[in-house]
């Protein structure tokens, strides 16, 4: 709490843009180095923009642990715990055991970020598939949903998920950017879809604009994936900024535009879908009841 750090310092009056309804950012990389000096102010600005719930992305053991620690310090913050496909080479049985232990913490609401990325192949596909398979197993055992990254691997992803579909509860393909066929394949597998500001990019998000209307509202969630993917629909004065959860309402605006619906309705629908997906309502209730009399701040 720092009263000298009002959100007004950062956003000029005309550019403050508050969501009409509370939003959930399902992909915030707040343990990224670029947030290390001002993460509390970033969370404060998110609340001010009515982005009141953040799911912090864990991409390896250290960052997942940091995300859990941060979630413990702030109401409305939760974490995922998993190993990103870029660094799938790191997977081992021992790491799997440590991930499983972390995933039992009450702040952890999903297994991930995990998946397949054949775009850059920073880890060879064989290692990516091994690490992903092991994390599918962890999700099956814990009953937690999966937070999945997939790039240029839609075919293999669908094959692997199909084999596991009856054993896992829910899964979201975060930052979906693929084509119509892949989208329908995922929807047929009863998966959820996460959309980022990619859609706001007229250079490469064009194909997504025709697709957003085919995603049922009961499967659609929104995310910044900050500090990455700063939306390109921001007013000139905000361009070039680091992306952060407070800017999520701009992504809602763009999706609502291409779906031809009101922002307030989209905000309500995505928040309801997200609460159900991660079980947030029950968790918030637990937090309230368990912190009563515990003297927690
Ligand atoms: Zn990702």
Image: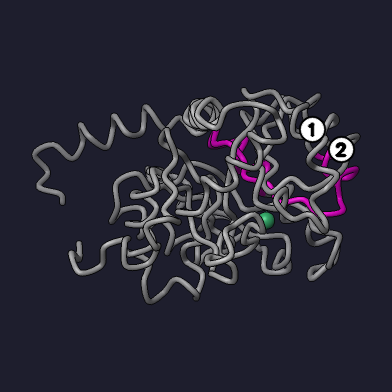
The answer to which image quadrant residue 127 occupies is bottom right
- Which sits in the foreground, 212 or 232? 232
* Residue 269 higher or lower than 209, as above or below: above
Q: CA distance from mark 1 to mark 2?
A: 6 Å
Residue 129 visible in rendering:
no
Which stretch is magenta? Answer: 135-160
The residue carrying mark 1 is 186
Callouts 1 and 2 close, C-beta under 8 Å: yes
Q: What's the image's color scheme?
A: one colour
- Which sits in the foreground, 105 or 214? 214
Q: Which mark is residue 182?
A: 2
| Quadrant of the image where one finds ligand 1 | bottom right
Q: Is residue 145 left or right of residue 128?
A: left
Give x and y (percent) for residue 168. 65, 31
Q: Is residue 119 left or right of residue 242?
A: right
The quadrant the N terminus occupies is bottom left
Please rate how many residues cluster around mark 2, counting C-alpha atoms within 10 Å: few if below 14, some from 14 to 19, many from 20.
some
């Amino acid at each position: 709490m720092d009263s000298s750090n009002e959100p007004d310092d950062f956003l000029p009056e005309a550019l403050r843009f508050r969501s009409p309804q509370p939003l959930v950012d399902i992909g915030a990389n707040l343990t990224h180095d670029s947030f290390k000096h001002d993460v509390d102010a970033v969370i404060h600005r998110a609340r001010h923009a009515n982005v009141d719930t953040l799911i912090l992305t864990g991409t390896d053991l250290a960052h997942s642990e940091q995300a859990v620690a941060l979630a413990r310090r702030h109401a409305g913050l939760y974490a995922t715990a998993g190993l990103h496909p870029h660094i799938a080479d790191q997977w081992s049985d021992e790491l799997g055991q440590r991930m499983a232990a972390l995933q039992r913490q009450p702040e952890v609401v999903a297994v991930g970020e995990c998946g397949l990325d054949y775009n850059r192949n920073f880890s060879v596909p064989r290692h990516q598939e091994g690490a992903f398979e092991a994390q599918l197993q962890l999700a099956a055992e814990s009953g937690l949903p999966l937070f999945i990254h997939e790039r240029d691997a839609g075919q293999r992803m669908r094959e692997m998920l199909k084999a596991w579909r009856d054993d896992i509860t829910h899964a979201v393909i975060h930052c979906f950017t693929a084509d119509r066929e892949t989208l329908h394949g995922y929807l047929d597998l009863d998966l959820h879809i996460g959309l980022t500001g990619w859609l706001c990019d007229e250079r490469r998000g064009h194909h997504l604009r025709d697709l957003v209307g085919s995603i049922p509202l009961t499967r659609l969630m929104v995310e910044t994936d900050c500090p990455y993917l700063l939306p390109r629909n921001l007013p000139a004065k905000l361009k070039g900024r680091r992306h952060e959860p407070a800017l999520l309402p701009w992504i809602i605006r763009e999706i609502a535009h291409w779906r031809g619906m009101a922002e307030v309705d989209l905000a309500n629908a995505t928040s309801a879908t997200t609460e159900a997906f991660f079980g947030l309502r029950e968790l918030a209730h637990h937090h309230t009841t368990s912190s009563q009399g515990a003297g927690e701040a």
